Image (spheres, grey):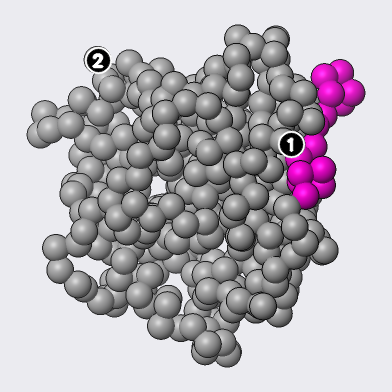
Amino acid sequence: MPTPMSPLDAWLHSHQSTRALCMTFGLVARFAHGPAPALHDLRDRAAARWARHDRLRMGPGPRCWVPGPPFDPVHHVTATAAGTRPGSLEEHTAQLLARPFGPPRPPWQLHLLPAPGDGFALLLRAHHALLDGRSLLTLVQELLDGPPARRTASPAPARRRGTGLKDVLPAGRPLPFHGPVDSRRAVAWSRVTAGELAAARDALPSGRASANAVFLAATAGALRGAGAAGRLPFLPGVCAMVPVDVRVNDDAALGNHYATVRVPLPVRNDPRRRLAAVDRFTRGTALHERARAQARAVAGMAGRPGPLTEALGRYVDSSLYSSLLCSSLADREGPRALGPAALTGLSLLPALSPGHPLVVSMVRDATGAATLAVVSDHAHRALAGRLSALLHEEIRALGP
């Protein structure tokens, strides 16, 4: 029986169905120190561990999800043999991110890809209307061998609050890279060691900053260093749209269960001043309080599509609402492996949104290290590579 899409699902689905923007996104898991699995073994593993998820059988209908055929690992799990396609792992991944899903199958796939040296990678990609970043991480955790992932409760807000006027007013300004999004994708990522990230978190005399605050402050510095922060003093400043998980208790449900919070990104000279400002804004339960308020507001729009809702959606997509998406995940359990091969890193590759041809992400793993990633359209591929390097430099600059 068809299930109505949530307002968030419907909004994400409309980006591709009505605005012709590919909404494929993904999570890359990289492995080393062991051979890649045989394709039939990977398919058997996926069927054994994922077939129970009804969400993975859903396909989109008119503002609803329609149950599809039984779980089919042959269709959903594929492989690219080493040497059959030129280019790096980043290039292979970018090509797959630019490939939209269409009917009739549920919009997700798992790809086994070659990687430099003796390594390999898995790319789990999906239409963003079907799954969110936490869902991708949950599925990868279930697929791999290792300790069962602990589900920790999200911090409960101290009080209920509504969405105030400041949560709706313009908070961003057009930046040099804003504009139409083309049909191709570029990917760049860099690895931050546990020592580098720990040193950056300890940079403030007022107390240890969160890893997310370090990531956001480094993004502000990288934009400034790349000359991409803009110079329009009569408009608001640079502002990040930050997805926040709104699942409660140990809920690991698949789907889209997040809301976004806008975080000002101070584009000033001193890295520690940037970090202090972001840390003050994001400390404690502040982000979760704002996210839950927004989730309640969005849920209240259910069943009320119309011109006003569509206009609000276009505004939320605009550069005046936010400057860029900054998404982060944490895989706190480890070590993980796929057979004898050890997991060495995870990269979240968010979908682009209308008018925003560039996004950044960070995924932390159980070792305390993290992978920074930048996704852009083809026209901004040079900026993606530059920002990936600058993000790493900004985090190192916070250390001693």
Instruction: For the N terminus, give its image quadrant.
Output: bottom right
The disc at residue 303 is none
Q: Left of 74 or right of it: where is 383?
A: left
Label 2 sits on residue? 400
Q: Left of 153 or right of it: where is 40?
A: right
Q: Where residue 84 sits in the image (x, y, percent)? A: 89, 23
Query: How far, Cα to Cα, is label 1 from label 2?
Result: 47 Å
Residue 249 is one of the magenta-drawn residues:
no
The answer, for residue 62, to whether it is visible in the render is: yes
Q: Amino acid at mark 1?
A: Arg
Magenta range is 72-85
Q: Where residue 389 sits in the image (x, y, percent)? A: 52, 25
Q: Amino acid at mark 2?
A: Pro
Dot 2 surroundings within 10 Å: few (below 14), some, or many (20 or more)? few
In front of the other: label 1 or label 2?
1
The answer, for residue 90, to whether it is visible in the render is: no
N-terminal of the two: label 1 or label 2? 1
Circle 2 — which element? loop
Residue 156 higher or lower than 25, as above or below: below
